[in-house]
Image: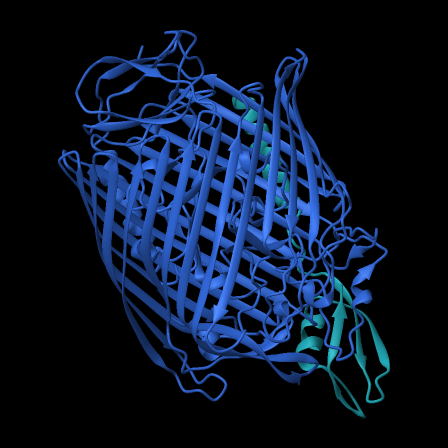
Amino acid sequence: MKKVVFSVAFIATSLILVTSCNKNKCHECHYDDASGNEIPLGEKCGDEVETLEANGYTDTTGNYVVHCHE
Amino acid sequence: MLYTGLKASVILFCLFTSFLGNSQIIKGQLLNKTTSQCIVGARIYIVETEQLCVSDSTGYFSFRQPPVMPFRIKIQAIDYGSQLITIDSVRSSFKIELEEKHIDMQEFTVSGSTAQMQNKNPFHIETRKISELTSVAAMNMGEIISNIPGVYQSNLGNGISKPVIRGQQGMRVVTLINGLRIEGQQWGGDHGMGISELGIGSVEVIKGPASLLYGADALGGVIYFTDENYAATNTQELQACLIGNSNTMGGGGKFLFKQSKQNLKWMIGSSYTNHADFQLASKQFAKNSRFNEWVIKSALSWNSKNSIHTFRYSYVQSTTGIPGHTHDTLVNFQDFQVDDQKRKYELPAQFFSNHYFSFDNKWYYKKNTLHFLLGSTWNKLIEYDEKVTIPSINMSLFNSLYSLKWIRNQGKKLKLIAGIQGMLQNNRNGLNPSDTLVPNANTLDNGVYGTIQYEWRKWNFQAGIRFDNRRIETFDVFHSINPVVKSFNSPNGSIGSIYNSGKFTFRTNLSSGFRSPHLSELLANGFHHGALRYEIGDINLKPEKATQIDVTAEINQEHLVWIINPFINFMKDYIYILPSGAYQDGMPVFTYEQLNQVLFYGSDIGMHYHPHFDHRLHIESSVSLIYAQSATDSSVSLLPQPRIQNTLKYTFDIGKKFKLKDLTIQYAWMAKQNQVAFNELPSDSYHLLHAALSFDIRLKSIFSCNIGCKNILNTNYIDHLSRLKNIQMPNPGRNFYISLSYKLSNNLKNKTK
């Protein structure tokens, strides 16, 4: 019985560890320009995604809201 | 706050464990009253000490003498039903003779003012075992309890489901697990219950106002979940189960381990489920309806000389896709029905996590019982809408509560109950969400109540009064509204009686309830992406009040039981949400309004037939009817469709290595719903047919297998309460499932012999 309990506990713990989230995931990002065209920004990862989504993308024509996808 | 609660719990734990005591062993024997044959395998549960034992091959069972006299034992045996017996004198052994019962409609309830048999309770409480409700498997707890007459579910796909009692839902329904009130931002239509099936043994439903016992918000009803029993004394038990579903290409697994000694009992378990987008009857898939859920559950209980103490901790975490999300003003609903089934997380999505702590204590004295519960719940709700790192909503709700109840037995006929209850809620928004729908606020509840119960011949009477205060305090300026402090008071009460002659039961009661406006109704001003709308609150809303008359008549014959349960619920200052016709960034704007008077009325009618010519056959039918009438207009939305449910169950005893156990067929007819509010569309009627077959595979160990099919006819339907109705998304199509369960039980070294 003890073996069974320990086996189940081990499997459960392993599953939790294996499925833990990865905070440095990468995402495809884009913004919509003034004409409504979707402009891809390529794959962005980690803090860069956070900064882009928080501050938007700025170029000579203005600042645009950035969307990133899974 | 959490630290203080835990510190108190640790001190109490140290105090109580020092009183662990020993007392004598009592032996009993269960016999058939007619034939005097012993009854084998009956489950004998000592109510006061929560001990469980099982009768052996000679009908004998034994347990340690409880510290209180009289004490009650609940006996459950196949073909004998449930019986509650009071032992009122000290003795070392006794015999109990039971009469065979073909139909058992009398359950033991714990959600009332005291634990008692339903046939002595003046208030109608529906009690069901989860195992009975899952004879055909369900995706979530909301779906499980929607098999109870008068109870429905309002769902947003498979991952989010909320209970609906007689047309009331959200903040009007109070949900508890083992006495702990669950708070999980239930004001939102897209915020689920946060309760998993793991380790839950039964559910009790109080339909209608129940503020006397549960205070503010218990206006539409109460759902009270109770854990499974611990393992039988001096045994340990391991349960494991795997399930797979064709419709969502998903499933899950769970395990639960229990161990019980004379004075110490504990259980621990975990489950995981993962489902991809569900398939529609058209063979397409509901885009982003996927979800997954993790659950951990644990309980530790110990007995001392005259008391019992239980510490419980559970954790539920779910990640759910939100289907039908768009900011486009011109929406094509077909865009949400896609050809590919996906499982991988994508936006928009909801992350919902709940921690539940409770420390439950009961002290037994000669004529008095004291019940003290301390608990906390911590809910975290995050929704990501258009950005992967910046949530649209990020809220924490920390809830601390206490409940102190004193029960005095004044002789055998009279019982006095008094108590105080309180709750402190802290609602906090995270630092970085793009929207804040409700402000940072504290809510403080306090209530005091008293109840009297009296038994006279075949009658039982109960009456009680209560006074509640709720104080809401917000911080900071919120959408141009300065911080506010609001206080709401309300007296409530209930009175009821029951006449039970064995063959006929008549129950009638009058009860009241109140609900003060929630923060979201008072101060909301923002996008609620899960509900697909922009919500605006009203600071001047008044508390809702409800008064209900509920009557139950039961005719109990040997092979047939009839129940009719009509009700009238009169609500004053009913709060509802109304589309204003305006749009904000493509989303419709809704405002909170108040109606002077609404009358809800209807009935649940039930029948259970167990024919004499074949005792293996059970036929159950129920009809649920709910109507609303308002004095001024028709603003009451989301009224459940009239429903007829039928269940046919046939038990078998065929085979040895492959043993067929039972076949269940369920048929439900949901009638057309034409009672609709402004801008609410009527719903068509539909039929649903489900079937399940269960059998044992007896190898070296016994494996239980359940195979079934839900929505056999592949009906394409949209339920009136579905949150996806506004995007014309049908409910799931046909689903085949298979589950495999394993249960291992063995004895520990028995020190009592």
Location of the C terminus of chain B by quadrant is top left
Name the spot of residue B736 as percent of width and height, x first. Answer: 75, 38
Q: Is residue B93 above or below residue B227?
A: above
Q: Quadrant of the N terminus of chain B?
A: bottom left
Colour in which chain A is drawn = cyan
Image point (70%, 47%), residue name: B687
| Residue B596 in sight | yes
Query: Is residue B201 something one can see in this rendering?
Result: no
Q: Is residue B55 left or right of residue B731?
A: left
Q: Is residue B401 above or below residue B38?
A: below
Residue A23 coordinates in the image, percent (x, y): 66, 60
B151 lies left or right of B718:
left
Q: Nearer the viewer, residue B721 or B682?
A: B682
Q: Nearer the viewer, residue B302 or A16?
A: B302
Q: How many marks?
A: 0
Pinpoint residue B55: horizontal percent, then vertical percent: 40, 15
Rendered blue, the chain in question is B
Residue B69, quarter of the rendered image: top left
